Image (tube, rainbow, N blue to C red):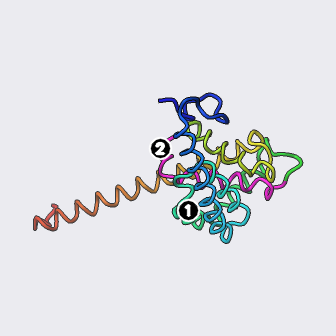
Amino acid sequence: MNSRKNNPDKHKPAPKDPSRVAGDEIGEAAGGISGVVVGAAIGSVGGPVGTLIGGIAGAVGGWWAGHSVAEAAQEYTVGDDAVYRNHYENSPNRLADRDYESVSPAYRLGHLAAHNPDYRGRPFSQVEDELRRGWNGGARQNYGEWDSVRGYVNDAYDRSASAIEQQRLRDEANNAAEEADKRLEDSGDMNIF
């Protein structure tokens, strides 16, 4: 199949498949519209990150263009922000000309990306291209080049993904314990000694 996805020059349509190119353009337009809607919804909660997520939704689509990303954005806490602020302010790679507020959308992007079920269990290196494409779709003008914020996105992605995995393991262990208790209770053998 000769598609834009396999085309090394993604800005030009792949030859000999005009229906695929038209479908891509329609999908991108729909993604852009849903990105604006999702960005507006998140914007009311997350400030500048709403615009950022809207841009990613338009460029990438999928989870980024749905209701779940808005829910994930609402779960971003003051505590999360404090951790990222401390990380930035104590980082040897801190940008001398930029304060935390100017790079905080990069941290939020990484944090939210870890909540994307399509990224679950995947290292940052495997999701970076989509995040970069979304970032370059609009955030670059307001928050800087991808290469200058990439490390912050990566750090937040890794931290959030780790916390999600730890919670998943705790939930799994609790569920297994509850099931074992129920089996024991159902068997009527409550004497464990």
> At numbered mark 1, what does the secondary structure look like: helix, strand or loop?
helix
How many marks can you see?
2
| Residue occupied by mark 2 | 121
Q: Residues within 10 Å of mark 1 (few under 14, many from 20)?
A: some
Vertical comparison of 90 with 184: above or below: above
Q: List x then y, in percent, for residue 154.
A: 64, 44
Q: Residue at x 50, y 41 (%)?
A: 122
Vertical comparison of 192 with 44: above or below: above
Magenta stretch contains residue 29:
no
Q: Residue at x 50, y 54 (%)?
A: 164
Q: Residue at x 65, y 53 (%)?
A: 109
| Residue occupied by mark 1 | 72
Q: Quadrant of the C terminus?
A: bottom left
Q: Residue reaching furthest right?
A: 97
Most foreground residue, 186 or 131: 131
Q: What kind of residue is marked 2?
A: Gly
Viewer can see residue 96? yes
Viewer can see residue 57? no
Pick whichever of labels 1 and 2 is earlier in the sequence.
Answer: 1
Q: What kind of residue is marked 1?
A: Ala
Asked if disc 1 and disc 2 are in contact, CB closer than 8 Å, the reply is: no
Vertical comparison of 136 with 81: above or below: above
Q: Which residues are magenta?
A: 99-123
Q: Residue reaching furthest bottom?
A: 44
Most foreground residue, 81 or 106: 106
Q: Quadrant of residue 168?
A: bottom left
Q: Residue reaching furthest left?
A: 188
Magenta stretch contains residue 110:
yes
Q: Main secondary structure of the magenta part?
A: helix
> At numbered mark 2, what does the secondary structure look like: helix, strand or loop?
loop
